Image (tube, rainbow, N blue to C red):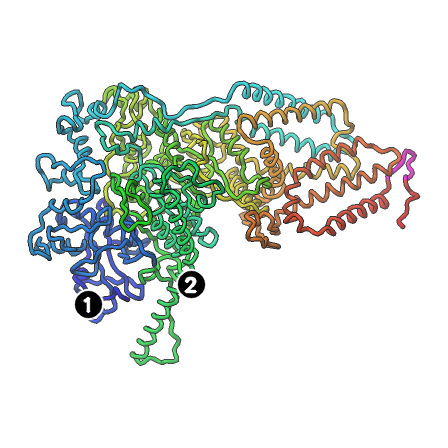
Amino acid sequence: MSSLNKQASKKSLRNSGGLSGGPQVGSTSGGPSVKFARRTSSGRYVSLSKDDIDMSSDLSGDYMNYTVHIPPTPDNQPMDTSIAMKAEEQYVSNSLFTGGFNSVTRAHLMDKVIDSEVTHPQMAGSKGSACSICDGRVMRDERGNDITPCECRFKICRDCFIDAQKESGLCPGCKEPYKVGEYEEDLHDYPTNGTLASLPAPNGSKNSNMSVMKRNQNGEFDHNKWLFETHGTYGVGNAYWPQDDFDEDGDEAVKAGMLDHEKPWKPLSRITPIPSSIMSPYRCLIAVRLVVLGFFLHWRVTHPNNDAIWLWLMSITCEIWFGFSWILDQVPKLCPVNRSTDLAVLFEKFDSPSPSNPTGRSDLPGLDLFVSTADPEKEPPLTTANTILSILAVDYPVEKLACYISDDGGALLTFEAMAEAASFADLWVPFCRKHNIEPRNPDSYFSLKVDPTKNKSRTDFVKDRRRVKREYDEFKVRINGLPDSIRRRSDAFNAREEMKMMKHMKESGADPTDTVKVLKATWMADGTHWPGTWANPSSEHSKGDHAGILQVMLKPPSPDPLLGSTDDKIVDFSEVDTRLPMFVYVSREKRPGYDHNKKAGAMNALVRASAILSNGPFILNLDCDHYIYNCKAVREGMCFMMDRGGEDICYIQFPQRFEGIDPSDRYANHNTVFFDGNMRALDGLQGPMYVGTGCMFRRFALYAFDPPMVDKMDEKKDVKHGEDSETPALDATEFDSNLDVNLLPKRFGNSTMLAESIPVAEFQGRPLADHPAIKYGRPPGVLRAPRQPLDATTVAEAVSVISCWYEDKTEWGDRVGWIYGSVTEDVVTGYRMHNRGWRSVYCITKRDAFRGSAPINLTDRLHQVLRWATGSVEIFFSQNNAFLASKRLKLLQRLAYLNVGIYPFTSLFLVVYCFLPALSLFSGFFIVQTLSIAFLVYLLLITVCLVALAVLEVRWSGVELEQWWRNEQFWLISGTSAHLAAVVQGLLKVLAGIEISFTLTTKSAGDDEDDIYADLYIVKWSSLMVPPIVIAMMNIIGIVVSFSRTIYSANPQWSKFIGGAFFSFWVLAHLYPFAKGLMGRRGKTPTIVYVWSGLIAITLSLLWVAINPPQGGDGQGVGGDFQFP
């Protein structure tokens, strides 16, 4: 390879400060040691020290350059300035970190991440000038400009710079001593973009620790932070701290300097109640129907059908259960609410410039966004890449955002697709900001059928859009070509390794007939082995057996805006902030013998890794196929968290909206009755359930702490801090009296960095203490300080917490984070939070917050519902049953969670009840002895109440009547198929320990690629379809048989036939979408099928009449003269 050197460079002679194994990583306060290394051309890691080279001098030709990072200690600090911090962060962002159980944490410096060119300076592998001493890359600033620490502008990389500092302190170019602090002119030749001019550090101290700590990521002295922590003054025209009226903590000073008491206080959110003209009749009808239902069931119990007691017993049992199920579903809907937010007030409080914040640096808390994927074959990388691009372009302070992608499959295809997405974001994100693009998923945006120039006034929009569209098409081609590119690259490198092995065997005199055995590895773009899953799996390189991988794709941005330029750019971004949010690729370690707990385990790994790297107080999780459709949605969610009383909100749940659904929504994929009805109603109680995606969590709530008890904390605060509305940062033990400091490792693991991040996340996630009524808040302005740069120790700690051993003997998955033990881990996780006293909020935005995809094929939809119902059965038989909930769970909220665990069991009664009309028609008996007036009146009242309730529910929820009817239809379809299978599966698992699965096979497939709804017509056979098919056939044949028998009867009893036929038609009407799904594409079913079906039905009915002719009044058969021709 081109980067191979025949001689070991001087970097390769630097010794490690010590290596640590997997379990020991993170156990000490100093963090783990990290080994920076380059792998050999064969992909092996080898540690070369001076002793190693002395012992084996002939090895140097086969190895690439490597360096060893020495952990920072008080006696090993070459220079305490921002240039070293910048260089360290750049070095870290260009390294692929790997590690795990009983293995060394390594950082592999990557010359290139993808085959295509990388230009953004934040991205790993971005281009740069070469070092004048070695083949390394010159240090760069946030704009990608070379950092030259000497006036002679001698280009030098980070390693050589540190070597020069340690050895002589002289510049290798001009041989003059480095003058610390004078290089800053070279770093900032560009305009300051409206920021304050650089001022000298206080007291003229250049090398003091305070001066270093107060520097921002641009290398400039951070005067805002210095003023806040030292209460210094610069005089008129700058921020001024009053010299009196503040305590030793400076709380009063913060309040006086940051708050403007002349402005009236405004709330960030409001609750809008449903009009009483709708809710009063709605609640009244619920009460009326409940009373009528009680009288009806009493009448049914006291009036049995003695002619068919078996039929009556089955029907009354089912009806009593349906009444109980209706109560569980309907009663929690008594208090629905609507909510609204005020984004203008949010901007005014957190982002607007002020005398103390002239640059308008944001005071909003950090936000970490999680995206999970597991298999690039089932979840296309292009879909995931578009989701990532929508996240990177979200309208939120860039320096406050961090995006994490969890690749549970450890696939190189996903890794390189994410790197391509990060590279394309350099163009896409500024384009979205410049022209206010919505949606910010490029695939969805360029697929819009509306006029793209609508509401666009910039003259260069059309030109910019055309250029970005061309670049996006090329981006898609690169993504689609990645599988072939990786395969060809791997084949080439594997062939080279085979040739080298054959040459070695020939030189060593081995038998030429021996087979050359070389592992078929998967190779990265820089010519080294991929540490994750290989295309040809082998030991330590398969889906269930690979090391933990962490790559900072985009390093943290600078705290202040960086305007673009027109140089070498496709689009003019000279007036646009070109910074990108931090983006991290994570693939947790997997080893045989460990239960990795699927998605829940992956999410917990992200929680720990993000706590180390960014520690955003709030977390938003999305599925890989759910993208941000409204770029301001996260701001709307933050309005609730930062508003008065928001300290006890555990999460903000957004409704799920879907694209690609057929216009008629045949199988109720939109699920609007649940998302706009049930969830909105729960919002008026303790809050909506967590439904797996589109949810913004409070990180502190995920750590299994109880919500803050404001009243109790007020007593302690009044004693210690007076009557302030601000509560100081607390220790973890102050939130949980049962938590001992010594037991923190038992709950959270042995990472001290993780433990130390907990109170920080809690404090930063509090609402703003800008009103006397806010008893539990934080002072304004404390979150304007820039984020600390990443260093190798921090990233190595993040690698250690995603190891497979880390959760051993901890409470992760049992109490902390996402809860294990159920396929519906989302519902269980939300239930645990509500059970501890937290509340949640449902945020419905005018423009959909997120959009995703859903299966529109019948079989796929049934299997999706099967998974949900199976999880509900598991919840019912576990400790998460709402019967066992604490007193902190409100009564109506408890009923809602009870319904979650009980609703699948309704299928047992529903299947029986759907067979009753057919049995009634076959036997000639009805569920009641006679169709009396009382029965018909009760039936009429119940039906009228049902219709009236549906109309009112449609009005307050905004659900269309057709959507309500589709939901009713699919309730019966799923209840007679997937829910029934889930109950059987759950009972076998709980009672007998037998696990069964319902597989599907494709019988026919849609062949029209131009039809976006082609999947709707694909017919896949599944055992789940058997019960609905049998029910439909039984009811159809029953109607035909009963009709024929009634016609031939001497005394036809039309009342019984009409009663049975009415309920049969009720069943068949609900099964109509199921029948359409079985028939496939309209017009594709041959007409002869319908003819044959009709002939078979008529023949069966005539056969039944001939075998069992109806009896006349005298006991003789009627119609005996009829004979078959």
Q: Which residue corresponds to the image point at 45% horizontal and 23% vertical from the top-left?
A: 272
Is residue 1104 shown in magenta? no
The residue pinned by badge 2 equals 536
Q: Quadrant of the N terminus?
A: bottom left
The image's mark for residue 713 is: none
Q: Which residues are magenta?
A: 1110-1118
Which one is nearer the viewer's eye here, 724 or 118? 118
> Callout 2: few (<14), some (14-19), or many (20+) C-alpha neighbours within 10 Å?
few
Q: Position of residue 720 (x, y in %)?
A: 23, 23
Q: Which residue corresponds to the image point at 78% horizontal and 28% vertical from the top-left?
A: 930
Amino acid, disc 2:
Asn
The residue pinned by badge 1 equals 7
Q: Position of residue 492 (x, y in %)?
A: 37, 68
Q: Position of residue 566 (x, y in %)?
A: 28, 47
Please identify the residue farthest to the left as the structure is shown: 176
Amino acid, disc 1:
Gln
519 above or below 988? below
Q: Is residue 387 visible?
A: yes
